[in-house]
Image (spheres, grey):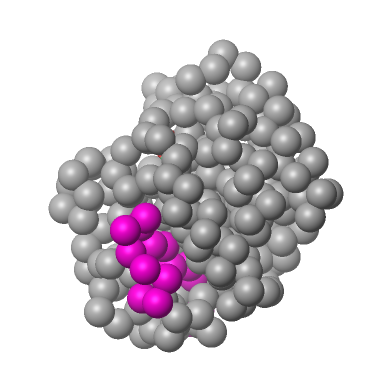
Amino acid sequence: MSRRDCLDRLQNAAPAVLPSLLLCDFGNLEREVRRLEEAGVAALHLDVMDGHFVPNLTYGMPLVETLRRLTTLPLDVHLMITRPERYLSQFVDAGADLLTFHVEATQEPRPLLEEIRKLGAAGGLALNPATPLESLENSLDLCDLVLVMSVPAGFGGQAFDPIALEKLRRLRELAPRMLLEVDGGVNLSTVAECVSSGAHLLVVGSAIFRHEDYAAQVRRLTQSAAAAALKG
Ligand code: DX5
Ligand code: ZN
């Protein structure tokens, strides 16, 4: 899918709950994807960790490629790796529609954002709770999305850090048209305030995958998000 199509689709779906597949049943990946499609999710969020930028280690291009074959949903790939520039084209080739890397992982985000666009994908910059917003101010014009982490990148199941809400509110003022995503500790207690602070995309891991009925959880989270969006 083209960069424009991907961004339009995500903008139109907002506020949208994006499942983070970290905790899904990898032994039954196809079934998991179908369950999420049936639940009506707008995209899949894939957490790539290298055991270096973060202490945890997950998966890489082959899993993105596998998912690409299983679904037409946009693939939102969140790179938690050092020197992300080494892998951008490989992830786009594997099927990433949206490729996000961390501002802490590079001195020069601009050339990477340019490269992602040249490769035909949408590009995002992520920042950890401890990283000030100023770190990405010079790159905002090249960002298709900003991913505000509400937990330190690395593990699912951590508690939501409200510093993310403050950043979302400031970003909404700084860049009113920017697609804003929040990731970490988003659940039924935190999703509404994420949306009222400006988040369009809500990444959710444990609050979906630790439940039997994914669709019911997606529905509850989406309802709470939509109600918050209506209130403005
Ligand atoms: C954390 C990842 C997240 C996370 C979400 O490094 O980027 O996508 O796994 O999981 P929960 O919702 O459990 O915090
Ligand atoms: Zn993530």
Residue 28 coordinates in the image, percent (x, y): 46, 22
- Above or below, comparing residue 113 to residue 94 in the picture: below
Residue 219 coordinates in the image, percent (x, y): 72, 29
Quadrant in which the N terminus is drawn: bottom right
Name the residue at 33% across, 64% down: 131
Name the residue at 66% across, 50% down: 195
How many numbered discs?
A: 0
Foreground of the two, 35 or 82: 82
Name the residue at 28% across, 48% down: 49
Left or right of residue 156: residue 35: right
Residue 62 coordinates in the image, percent (x, y): 35, 47
Name the residue at 79% across, 41% down: 227
Quarter holding residue 160: top left
Quarter holding residue 178: bottom right
Q: Residue furthest top?
A: 212
Report the magenta residues as a range. 117-135
Q: Is residue 142 magenta?
A: no
Q: Is residue 124 magenta?
A: yes
Residue 27 coordinates in the image, percent (x, y): 40, 22
Quadrant in which the C terminus is drawn: bottom right
Foreground of the two, 40 or 152: 152
Q: Can you see residue 133?
A: yes
Q: Can you see residue 17?
A: no
Left or right of residue 214: residue 220: right
- Above or below, comparing residue 83 to residue 134 in the picture: above
- Above or below, comparing residue 139 to residue 39 in the picture: below
